[in-house]
Image (cartoon, rainbow, N blue to C red):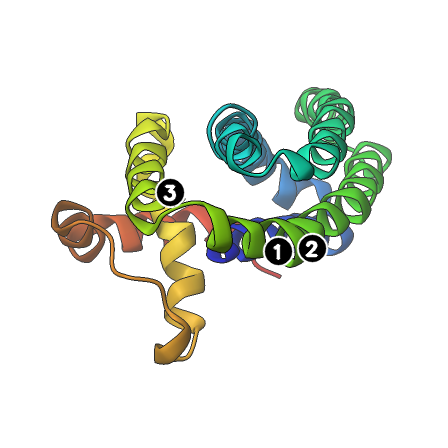
Amino acid sequence: LKVVHQTFRRATDRMIEATAKLEPAALRPAIGRYWTFYYDVLEYHHHTEDHKIFPALVRRDPGAELLIGELGADHLKLVAVNEEIQAAVRAFEQNPDVAGRDRIHAGLLELRDLFFRHMGREDDEVLPLVARWIPGEEWDAMDREALRGIPKAHLPFAVGALDEIVRSLPAAERPPPPPLPVRVMLALSWRKKWAAFVQPLSV
């Protein structure tokens, strides 16, 4: 889960940097595809938390209910911010000017402020509770289920994004490797697909 959070932080920062520095003509071909990927995977991630991880935790530790309620409320706030960015991206694709680019940038800054605080709370407050209350085998099963549920169109890029973060970590901090078929696809094509996917946003 920490690696997932680091992946979302990197993705958010990547879009903020791109919308701050790229000219509209350079940004237009890349931002819509990348935002759609980010939006869909983030929505899926929060759905998994709301319907799998959080309920499993509260069942074992009812005292966590207030914390989980606050984090669930954050998810709703993030939906509202994301919808504003979604509208800004769609408008920019139709009319790629500086004002439109700057509107996306402002929305992403708002998203970062809320989302990074939210993920920090999950890292600091939820993960210790998960480690205490949810058995390792149950957590591993939820992790496998979450991987299988990623929308198929986004799977190569989601795994590529995670791989980018994992490979940047010291060996001692890396999570266990993904299933063998995923490792094979990474080596054969997904790592290259991810690099090509993010290259237009590089600044």
Mark 2: amino acid: Gly
Question: Which numbered disc flags the more N-terminal residue, 3 or 1?
Answer: 1
- The residue where tag 3 is placed is 157
- Local SS, label 3: helix
Q: Position of residue 149 (x, y in %)?
A: 34, 27
Q: Quadrant of residue 157?
A: top left
Dot 2: element: helix
The total of numbered circles placed on residues is 3
Query: Marks 1 and 2, Cα distance to the nearest angstrom?
Result: 5 Å
Residue 53 image position (x, y, % from top left): 49, 35
Rounded to the nearest whole Å, what is the CA distance between mark 3 and mark 1? Answer: 24 Å
Q: Mark 2 or 3, which is nearer the eye?
A: 2
Q: Which residue is mark 2?
A: 120
3 vs 1, front mark: 1
Q: Amino acid at mark 1?
A: Asp
In the image, residue 126 sits, relative to residue 69, either above or below, namely: below
Dividing the picture into quadrants, the one containing residue 66 is top right
Residue depicted at 47% across the width and 57% down the height:
3
Rendered image quadrant of residue 79 = top right
Mark 2 and mark 3 in contact? Answer it, CB < 8 Å: no
**Which of the marked residues, 2 or 3, is nearer the chain's N terminus?**
2
Q: Is residue 86 above or below residue 174?
A: above
Q: Residue at x 20, y 47 (%)?
A: 182
Q: Are marks 3 and 1 in contact (CB under 8 Å)?
A: no
Residue ID for mark 1? 123
Q: Are marks 1 and 2 in contact (CB under 8 Å)?
A: yes
Q: Secondary structure at mark 1?
A: helix
Q: Amino acid at mark 3?
A: Phe
Label 2: few (<14), some (14–19) or many (≥20) C-alpha neighbours in 10 Å: few
Q: In 3D space, how far apart are the residues under numbered discs 2 and 3 (Cα atoms)?
A: 24 Å
Q: Nearer the viewer, residue 191 or 5?
A: 5
What percent of the width, then of the height, locates residue 199?
47, 54
